[in-house]
Amino acid sequence: MTLQEIVEHLSLKVLTEGKDLSQIVPASGYTSDLLSCVMAGAKHKALWVTLQSHINIVAVGALLDLSGIIITEGAMPDQATIAKANEEGIPLLSTEKPTFFVVGKLWEMGLREA
Amino acid sequence: MAQDQGPIRKGRTITDGAAGLITRVEELAYELKIDEVMTRDVKVVSPDTKMSELLELLRQARISGAPVVLHGRLVGIVSIEDLIRSLRAGDVESPVSKYMTPRVLTVHGSDPVIEALKVFTQTRVGRLPVLDQADNLIGIITKGDITRGVLRALQYDYQEEEVRRYRASHLFEDIVSDRTSLILRYNIKPRDFAHGGAASSNIKRALLRLGASPQIARRCGIAVYEAEMNLIIHTTNGGIIRVEIEPHLITMEAIDDGPGIADIELAMTPGYSTATEEIRELGFGAGMGLKNIERCVDKMLLESTPGKGTRLEMGIYLHPSALSKDANLSPKEGA
């Protein structure tokens, strides 16, 4: 399943640019709002679902080589965060929906590797 | 006389390098899987679609053909040539089923690219629908997709080669000394959350550039990130991160001048944190940082004197003899 399919199925807003999302296939999923938990628990190439939206999520994404970050509950990262994500090549996606809903949908779509 | 000078060579002489490249392209045709290079987002039509609607689709999507699907099953393929036939006959209101090619050649996503290439050279088709093991349509492949896929793979190879060229071991081999090392230093400011992770990202990138394996680079990145965030969150005046890269060992140090840790054992306890509510709201202060570091490195030393400062030393071995240990120490690394 590609990131592009996930974006379409969940009507996510793509905040970053320059990456062909139809060529990115997330290997697993992870969710937590505690960055150290993500550092410990998320595998590389994972898709991370969080309501954090500050610039450090990009650092975490880049260090773990994540496939992308879905920011939930309409939290909006600032321009500096989006610019940093573009620079590091980490797709940022946003939605008004809560994390629980997003994770449920991803599970339904078949992303079940934790 | 001019004729005695032997035949004039036309074009370029094939060098060893070029010959190697040709072989590599051939190899890639066997190594790359069709689903790695195909186009996934396929535009399809149904047998009832009118040729005039097909024309619009081809124009808008800038494609030259589309698979014909009925109830999820592939029943044919229709191309721009078929469209031209219908245009010539002034028959664009007819359904696609009248002009499509009903018996379609297909390939499987898990097949190597060479299988698609064989079909392209043996037949005159320009595009092949790609099916999964259950015969569902998952994509479409053209010669253009293969060219792009091969170029991407070659570019990746080239980057790998670049990285290999600068491999730390080689770099160090050329330099004769009793002890050679490369030292990277980063100054970390207190409460500078906007630059949190900058030092660890730079260190990770430097290690990859020096030819460290992605796993080693990630482990160093995670360990330094946690140390970096600790300096940002907890210190009075910030601190210094110092990374020393030697052929067999990466040593990372985080040093600050206060406030110091009163009870190191307590600080190491998962879930224990002295971070303020404000910092926790940003997702920090989970009380897992030091535990994460311990998990990622081969050796760890934490010394602190309240009022004086803290020194955290972390080490990751690079020597081949440390490789078996290596594998055990990164249980969370997925692939």
Image (cartoon, rainbow, N blue to C red):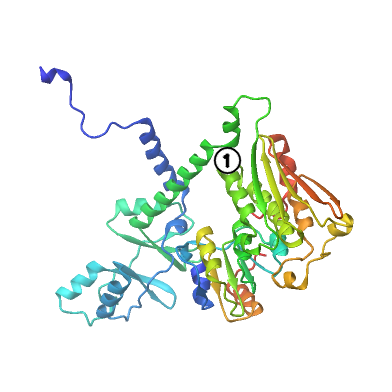
Q: Amino acid at mark 1?
A: Leu
**Residue B12 picture quarter:** top left
A29, A98: nearer the viewer = A98
Percent x, y of residue A22: 47, 65
The answer to whether any part of residue A1 appears in the image is no
B28, B168: nearer the viewer = B168
- The residue where tag 1 is placed is B210
Q: Which quadrant is the N terminus of chain B positioned in?
A: top left
**Residue B248 picture quarter:** top right
Identify whether A37 is placed above or below B214. below
Say left or right for B101 vs B219. left
Percent x, y of residue B50: 27, 81
Say left or right for B229 vs B111. right
Q: Residue furthest left?
A: B1
> How many discs appear?
1
Percent x, y of residue A32: 69, 69
B120, B142: nearer the viewer = B142
Percent x, y of residue B175: 59, 27
The residue shown at (68%, 25%) is B178
Chain under numbered label 1:
B
The answer to whether any part of residue B71 appears in the image is yes
Q: Residues within 10 Å of mark 1 (few under 14, many from 20)?
A: many
Give the SS element for disc 1. Answer: loop
B309, B279: nearer the viewer = B309
